[in-house]
Image (tube, rainbow, N blue to C red):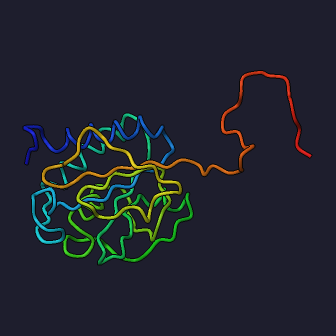
Amino acid sequence: METEQRPIADLVEQALDELAAAGGIRSGRLVVIGTSTSEVQGRRIGTSGTEAVASAIYDGVDRVRSRIGFDVVWQCCEHLNRALVAERSLAEAMDWTIVSAVPVPKAGGSMAAYAYRQMKDPCLVESVRAHAGLDIGETLIGMHLRAVAVPFRPSVRFIGEARLTAAYSRPKLIGGARAVYQLPAAEPPSDTCE
C-alpha cells in the first residue's frame, strides 16, 4: 500500500525521524507506537487488520530505531487493555509490570501481533511512560506518554488513510515568576532568595 506514491515504511521512517529530532529522542529513550492497520487501509479501526501493513510500519520504525538506538514498545488494542509489546529484558530492567497474554490480530491487533513475533523474547507490559510516540490511526497512545506531552506535527500527516498524530514529552516546568529554565549568561547576582 502506498500514500502519495511513497511506501508506508518510508512515510513512517520520515515521520519518526522528524519526531526524534524535534523531541531530542536518543539512545536510551522510549518510543511508543500505536497503530490501526485497518485505518491505514481506509477502514474502521479493528475491522480489517493486516500483517502486510504491520510489516511495512515495523520496517519504517526499525530503520530509525537502528540508527538512533531508542527502545520501542508497541501498543495493543483495547481488547488487551492497551498493554504494550516489549522485549522482556527491557521490561525487567525497567521493572514494568508484565502481564500474561499473547497478542493476536483479533485480540491485541495486527501491529502488536506482528511486532511480538519479531522480537527475541517478547512479553506484554501493563503500562509505560514513554518519551515520545507515534499514533497511526487515532489509537490513543496518550496513556503511555510521560507528562508533559508536547504535540508534534510531522510533515507526514497520513500513513495510508490513517491520520498520524505524534508527541514528545518534556520535563514539567516548576516554580513561579522567579523560576529560571535555562542557565543565564554570567551576570552578577542582583537578588537572593531568603
Tell me the quarter of the picture where residue 95 sits: bottom right
Q: Image check: 94 left or right of 64? A: right
Please state the horizontal and vertical placement of residue 140, each as a whole percent of the image. Answer: 34, 64
Q: Nearer the viewer, residue 141 or 77?
A: 141
* Residue 134 point in image, percent of width and height: 33, 51
**Eyeballing the image, is 115 above or below 64?**
below
Above-or-below relation of 106 to 135: below
Residue 10 lies left or right of residue 91; in this view the side is left
* Residue at the spot 18% in from the left edge and 52% down from the top edge: 55
Residue in front for this viewpoint, 42 or 96: 42
Closest to the observer: 152 or 49?
152
In the visual, does 72 lie left or right of 38?
A: right
| Outermost right residue | 194
Residue depicted at 29% across the width and 45% down the height: 61
Q: Nearer the viewer, residue 97 or 32?
A: 32
Residue 82 at x, y = what percent?
Answer: 36, 71
